[in-house]
Amino acid sequence: MLKAFIFDFDGVIADSEPCHYAATNEVLAQFGVKLAQEDYYTNYLGYTDYELFEAVRKEEKADYKDISIEQLTEQKAKVFEKLIKQGDCIIDGISEFIEKLKKEKIRIAVNSGASLADINIMLTGASFENSFDIIVSADDVTKGKPDPESYLLTLEKLNDISDLPISASQCVVIEDSRWGIISAKKAGMNVIAVTNSYPTEELKDAAIVVDSVREIDISQLHKLCSD
């Protein structure tokens, strides 16, 4: 039986990846580095900002001079905020789907590689802004996806607020990348993938792949947790 539904954020709740990509390149431009879009989506999507800038330093031989990774992530957050405020980034169907989950009294959480500040910026003004029981962000973990740390922490926090224990097998996760799928499965959770960022063949390790949350039925989720 389904007891908790956990959302990835970027690419699932919010169409924010283009803004993340643009903000990353704006910060990297001062060092003469530009990531190709295909390279970004293939190699860096799913990383925390800290992990991304570390990886770029190694892979692209980027010389950040006397600027720390922490300062780079702060720069990127400011650029991202500027870009995200230029338009509505919430993905179609999310609001209605969250309302369905709430009516069924199912716990709802977010587990994201984004910072809490970025998440709050994108949630501000959304109809479901205060709907999540738990939000786990990049600020809460030391290892990003595909490591299972963030999903294990999300489950721990859900159990802290629940009267009855929730097991990993009673959780369904929705992800948009193979890194997220690996992370959730390592934590013992059931995974649905949505093709907002990658085609179906890239998401084949998920139990179910959909093109939109509008295709998801709650009874289907209960069945997934009982298999």
Image (spheres, rainbow, N blue to C red):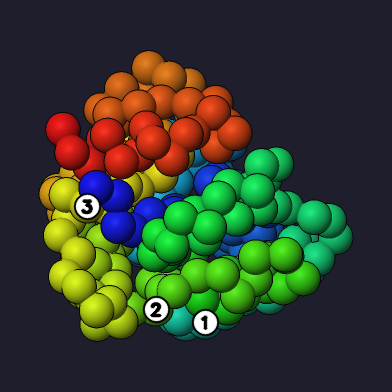
As shown in the figure, which amino acid type bears the numbered disc 1? Gln
Dot in front, 3 or 1: 3
Q: Is residue 118 left or right of residue 219?
A: right
Residue 22 visible at all: no
Query: Residue beneath label 2, please?
Result: 139
Q: Is residue 60 left or right of residue 15?
A: left
Residues at discs 3 and 1 in contact (Cβ within 8 Å): no
Residues at discs 3 and 2 in contact (Cβ within 8 Å): no
As shown in the figure, which amino acid type bears the numbered disc 2? Asp
Q: Among all residues in the image, which is located at the extreme right?
A: 86
As shown in the figure, which amino acid type bears the numbered disc 3? Gln
User: Would you place residue 64 above or below residue 204 in this image?
Assistant: below
Query: How far is mark 1 from mark 2, CA to CA?
Result: 15 Å
Sooner in the amino-acid sequence: mark 3 or mark 1: 1
**SS label for mark 3:** helix
Dot in front, 1 or 2: 2
Query: Residue beneath label 1, please?
Result: 71
Query: Residue beneath label 3, please?
Result: 170
Q: Is residue 211 left or right of residue 173?
A: right
Write the residue at 85% across / 60% down: 86
